[in-house]
Amino acid sequence: MKYADSGVNIDAATRALGRAKSAIRSTWDERVKSDTGAFGGLYQAAPGEPLMVASVDGVGTKVMVAVQAGRFDTVGQDLVNHCVDDILVQGAEPLFFLDYFATGTLNEDVLPAVLEGFATACRENGCALLAGETAEMPGVYAPGEFDLAGTIVGRVREEDLIDGSRIAAGDRIWGLPSTGLHTNGYSLARKVLLETAGFALDDVPEELGVSVADALLAVHRSYLPHLRTIWDAHGRAAVRGLAHITGGGFYDNVPRVMPQGLRAVIDTTAWNTPPLFRLIGDRGGVDPAEMYRVFNMGIGLCVIASPEVDLGALPDLEARIVGEVTSGDGGVDVRLGS
Amino acid sequence: MKYADSGVNIDAATRALGRAKSAIRSTWDERVKSDTGAFGGLYQAAPGEPLMVASVDGVGTKVMVAVQAGRFDTVGQDLVNHCVDDILVQGAEPLFFLDYFATGTLNEDVLPAVLEGFATACRENGCALLAGETAEMPGVYAPGEFDLAGTIVGRVREEDLIDGSRIAAGDRIWGLPSTGLHTNGYSLARKVLLETAGFALDDVPEELGVSVADALLAVHRSYLPHLRTIWDAHGRAAVRGLAHITGGGFYDNVPRVMPQGLRAVIDTTAWNTPPLFRLIGDRGGVDPAEMYRVFNMGIGLCVIASPEVDLGALPDLEARIVGEVTSGDGGVDVRLGS
């Protein structure tokens, strides 16, 4: 099975976005410091000021799992943490978050639970839930479903910006564990587990040891505390590049920070693939390369640092070396093992 | 007919939000300078810095009119201009905008047209389309439908902040014309015009003189050029309060800027209600008070200024006096006429 079989066509989205790229760029002036494809947009209102870093995202069809499980307090946390990570990879700390909640017919119990989730994660990340919008749109949403979008704004001093430009051949790529699928690949995961394999959400497959609902709804991890630990121990400059492993997996996200003339090599045998990913791959007959393109496979964040920085020694980080930087023609090799 | 009859229950949303208010406030510290209910959230990252003003919104079921009419280049403009107006009322000029586009199955022609709309309005407002997210979520959206959310970030110097605190008894309330429904009340408008009255989108009702599609898809006006004209002519301090007449109409939006001890009196006979609103009211048998609660009724922005400021003399503004400020117990009187 492939991601496209679950109804999500990444190539079509990429083509459609490509057609609009020049229109998007036509709105930019010298204050925009990022290009399309950056994790977060960079904006410097005036020279010398810190850079504002902003990102917008959703949680995909993880919302459908929440609806099916009747558990509404986690998807808001997922979205905040996802957004925090998307600007963290440029070195930014979050300032504030805005939420959008839309549904066909408002359920008075669902909305407060979702908002509590936003608030919980905002508190944990030291980020203000500054404003939000609730929309009731009969006819647009399928019955009982809702969608979320979130926008985060943070900032980073110019000298602390992480853009991958200091990455050098020989640098190590460290992986920090994810808690699960985070917020990507849910259409494929739902199709494989709930349709092909026929699991119910409260089933506890032997391979997982927890219910399918618990595994699928595990909250997207914020890596802000982890980065603070690293920065405190080794200084800001020790981190040369960060890649948030989201949609597109290692294949799409690691190259986003690699400079010209260098290549990342990821050795997937360096860590144990968590049971949830193995279960999806096995039951869905999903090709390994496709798995690493859709899912984070157990590594939610890649940290690129010079060889003398030992992240493995830092407590609670659970960092392990998952690859290295070599000279090459850009991009990434994902070595899938035997 | 009432708004609730179209499936939109504002009271339920208000109750649900009320339940989450303390959770939202628990994420705030001294850097948050606004309360819930402000048009835009105010955030001051450090004392003395300009205030960041941020707002998130959608265009409601105006997206369904766009889908039905097969016209996709305007809703993006609506959303940008709506967001611009929502932070303009606090005196802020826009810096950047982020968009979220979500649908069940991506149509490769729809997305670029929507993005072109965002870009067009961003250019017109001098605002960068900094980043965006496209989500394909089979099962969440009804077939053929899509939704949009947009977040804008602008800023304003502390001394230029417009928060209504300088409003005084005797001040005049000026109205600036809207282009149509802007982005509010579409569920009711669609129900009345397309169901009760039985119009097709390409019908040209005698009362309108244009097609129903043209009337319903008229682009939400950005009042940024109008405010720049006023500020250039009379200085920043001349504008004491601004109310963007969006969801909740005059009843909900004018009180958002009125200080304690003062009351706004709106005289609805001071302007001619545009034909589109009269058509909806007549064909739907909608109570006048309900009309003024759901729709802008032809006035998209209220500008509150001292009596010596004559906005009527400014070219291209089409400003007219629609009310005044009196002493009273807060809130607004909307005088509906005979």
Image (spheres, coloured by chain):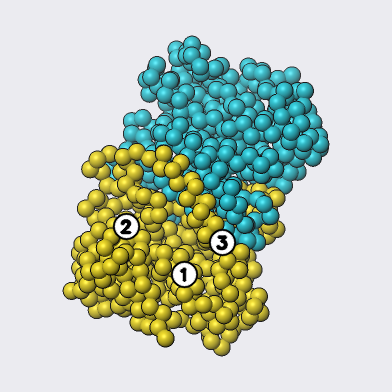
Chain colours: A cyan, B yellow
Q: What chain does badge 3 belong to?
A: B
- Name the disc covering residue B90, or none: 2
Which amino acid does the dot numbered 3 rest on? Answer: Asn
Residue B163 figure quarter: bottom left
Q: Is A117 drawn above or below residue A13 in the view shown? A: above
Residue A312, position in %: x, y? 51, 13
Q: Same chain for marks 3 and 2?
A: yes
Whether residues under marks 1 and 2 lie with C-beta atoms below 8 angstroms apart, the answer is no
Which amino acid does the dot numbered 1 rest on? Answer: Arg
Front-most of residues A112 and B310? A112
Q: Is A31 drawn above or below residue B296 in the view shown? A: above
Q: CA distance from mark 1 to mark 2?
A: 22 Å
Secondary structure, mark 1, is helix
Q: Is residue A300 left or right of residue B250?
A: right
Specify which label sits upstream in the sequence, 1 or 2: 2
Residue A146, position in %: x, y? 62, 50
Asked whether residue B201 is in view, the answer is: no
Q: Which residue is mark 1?
A: B293
Residue B118, position in %: x, y? 49, 58
- Name the disc covering residue B9, or none: 3
Looking at the image, is mark 1 or mark 2 nearer the viewer? 1
Image quadrant holding the C terminus of chain B, namely bottom left
Q: Residue at x 41, y 39 (%)?
A: B26
Q: CA distance from mark 3 to mark 1?
A: 13 Å
Other-residue count near label 1 (Cα within 10 Å), few / some / many at <14 / 14–19 / ≥20: many
Q: Residue at x 54, y 77 (%)?
A: B286
Front-most of residues B242 and B336? B336
Q: Residue at x 67, y 52 (%)?
A: A144
